Every structure is written in structure tokens, then in C-alpha cells.
Image: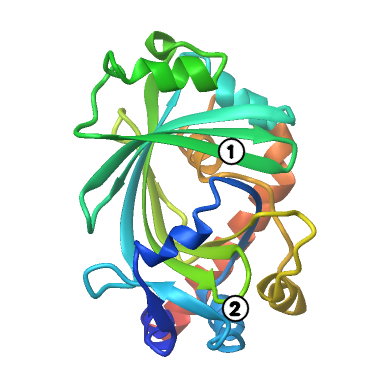
């Protein structure tokens, strides 16, 4: 983490206001899970290609996300069963600015469409007046949704200087739920490349591939749900989970050797 922060200090910076050119609320997402050391190597190749988001003189920004689902985890099951049209409903807080939103993410095959409303506070259940975004953007009703999982992480966001592309690098990822169960992804990084079109060339993706890092389609919500709920079905995710477990074990071993 420290080495990453030192490196991104060499990048040009961009403000939240100027980042509006790459909002990408309708986009194609590609996710990767790898080690911070690999991310460091890839970033070093692209210092002149991207700007890093800076807020209040910080480039590692703290996020808190609360995911909602039905009592029987219908949204999780849609993802697990490979449904091409699925949804997520969540609260998100940006710690540095204090901004809070209710967000709906709709996944249609390879495209992600995000709708959100700025709110003043998080309410449980979802407050009247906010129900419309759930009713209008999903097949669910707000009163059937419960808060299921909280994720906290630090994010570095890069904006391509020439193309409509954003890169997010999530670190220090932790999960917890209402039963006070906790789980950490350890010294792993989740990288997401967000583009306006699927066939847009990404030099960053090419650099990851050169490092042997390939796309891995699994969300933080699914990872956290599996980690904290030993009764949930996860057969379809097993190959991806083994990849994550091996990576976590490898990073833990390397850290222990350093210590």
C-alpha cells in the first residue's frame, strides 16, 4: 500500500469536478484480483497515461458500502446462477467528502447501468421517498429488502487522459454483517477497468495480461456473502474462490517472511 501511494504521487491529479468527463454510469466493467506488487509494476508503465483522483489532498479514498438483498438472497442467487440481467441495491458513503447515495446497479450481459440519488442519511428499512429508485430500476420493492453486508475499503481512481476509461484499485477490503462476523481479503487488490464500449482498447488491461492477470468475474458483494454465510450456495464460484484463497495465502506468506 505504501509503495503504491508513493508511485501514484508521480501521476498528474484530477479533481472530482473535472472527473465528470468519465462518469461512466453506463459502461462495460472488467474486474481483476491480484497483488499490490503486480499493480505497482503495471502502474509504473502508465504514469503518463492516467491522472489520479485527489480529494482533500488524498489519493487513497475511504469507501463504505451497505448492500441490500431479499431475505432469501435473491440478488446474490441471480449472480451465482449466471443470470445475464441482474441487480444490486446499496448505500454508499464517500468518507472524505461525507457524500451519501442510494445506488442501483443493473447488469445486462456485459454492460452496467448505475442510477443513484444523493441522500442525507442511511435508514433501515429504506425510507419512504427513496423507494422510487428501487421500484423504478429493479423488479424488487424497497420493503422486501434488508441490509445484508457492509464493505469498507480504500480506493485509488485513475482517469485516462485520452480515452473514456477509468481504473479503480481497491485495497484493504473488509466485510462485516449484522451478526458481527468479519472477514478481510488481506493484502489483495481488486482492479476494475470501466470503459464506455466493450471493444475499446485498454493499455492497462494489456499490461495486466502481460503479468499473467486475467479477468475474474466476481463482485465484492458475492465474495463477502460467501465469506460470512456458510449456508449460502457457491458451487459456481468455487474456481474463482480458490484463485482468491491462493492469492490471499501467498500474500500472507510473503508478508510473514518480510516481518
Residue at 58% in and 82% down: 49
Which is closer to the viewer, label 2 or label 1? Answer: 1
Which residue is the site of mark 2?
A: 38
SS assignment at label 2: helix
Q: In which quadrant of the rendered image does the C terminus lie?
A: bottom left
Quarter of image, res 138: top right
Residue at 43% in and 75% down: 52
Neighbor class of circle 1 (other Cα within 10 Å; few <14, some 14-19, many 20+) is some
* Image location of residue 232, percent across then percent down: 57, 26
Question: In screen coordinates, is 173 left or right of 26?
Answer: left
Q: How many marks?
A: 2
Residue at 19% in and 34% down: 120
Question: In screen coordinates, is 43 left or right of 149?
Answer: right
Question: In screen coordinates, is 128 left or right of 138?
Answer: left
Q: Nearer the viewer, residue 49 or 10?
A: 49
Which residue is the site of mark 1?
A: 113
Q: Is residue 232 visible?
A: no
Quarter of image, res 110: top right
User: Relative to residue 32, is residue 69 depicted above or below?
Assistant: above
Quarter of image, res 118: top left
User: Relative to residue 167, is residue 143 depicted above or below?
Assistant: above
User: Relative to residue 233, is residue 170 depicted above or below?
Assistant: below
Q: Nearer the viewer, residue 8 or 212?
A: 8
SS assignment at label 1: strand
Amino acid at each position: 500500500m505504501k509503495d503504491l501511494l508513493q508511485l501514484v504521487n508521480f501521476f498528474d491529479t484530477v479533481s472530482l469536478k473535472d472527473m465528470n468527463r468519465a462518469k461512466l454510469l453506463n459502461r462495460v466493467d472488467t474486474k481483476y484480483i491480484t497483488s499490490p506488487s503486480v499493480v505497482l509494476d503495471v502502474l509504473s508503465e502508465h504514469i503518463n497515461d492516467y491522472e489520479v483522483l485527489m480529494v482533500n489532498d488524498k489519493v487513497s479514498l475511504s469507501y463504505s458500502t451497505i448492500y441490500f438483498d431479499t431475505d432469501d438472497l435473491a440478488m446474490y442467487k441471480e449472480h451465482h446462477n449466471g443470470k445475464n440481467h441482474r441487480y444490486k441495491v446499496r448505500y454508499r458513503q464517500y468518507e472524505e467528502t461525507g457524500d451519501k447515495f442510494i445506488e442501483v446497479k443493473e447488469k445486462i450481459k456485459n454492460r452496467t447501468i448505475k442510477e443513484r440519488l444523493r441522500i442525507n442519511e442511511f435508514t433501515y428499512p429504506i425510507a419512504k421517498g427513496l423507494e422510487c429508485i428501487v421500484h423504478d430500476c429493479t423488479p424488487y420493492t424497497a420493503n422486501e429488502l434488508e441490509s445484508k453486508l457492509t464493505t469498507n475499503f480504500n480506493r485509488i481512481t485513475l482517469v485516462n487522459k485520452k480515452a473514456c476509461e477509468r481504473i479503480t484499485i481497491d485495497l484493504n477490503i473488509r466485510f462485516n454483517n449484522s451478526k458481527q462476523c468479519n472477514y478481510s481479503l488481506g493484502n489483495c487488490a481488486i482492479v476494475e477497468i470501466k470503459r464506455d464500449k466493450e471493444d475499446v482498447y485498454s493499455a492497462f488491461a494489456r499490461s495486466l495480461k502481460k503479468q499473467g492477470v486475467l479477468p475474474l468475474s466476481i463482485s465484492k458483494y458475492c465474495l463477502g456473502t460467501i465469506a460470512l454465510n456458510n449456508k449460502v450456495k457457491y458451487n459456481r464460484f468455487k474456481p474463482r474462490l480458490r484463485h482468491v484463497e491462493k492469492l490471499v495465502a501467498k500474500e500472507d506468506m510473503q508478508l510473514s517472511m518480510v516481518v
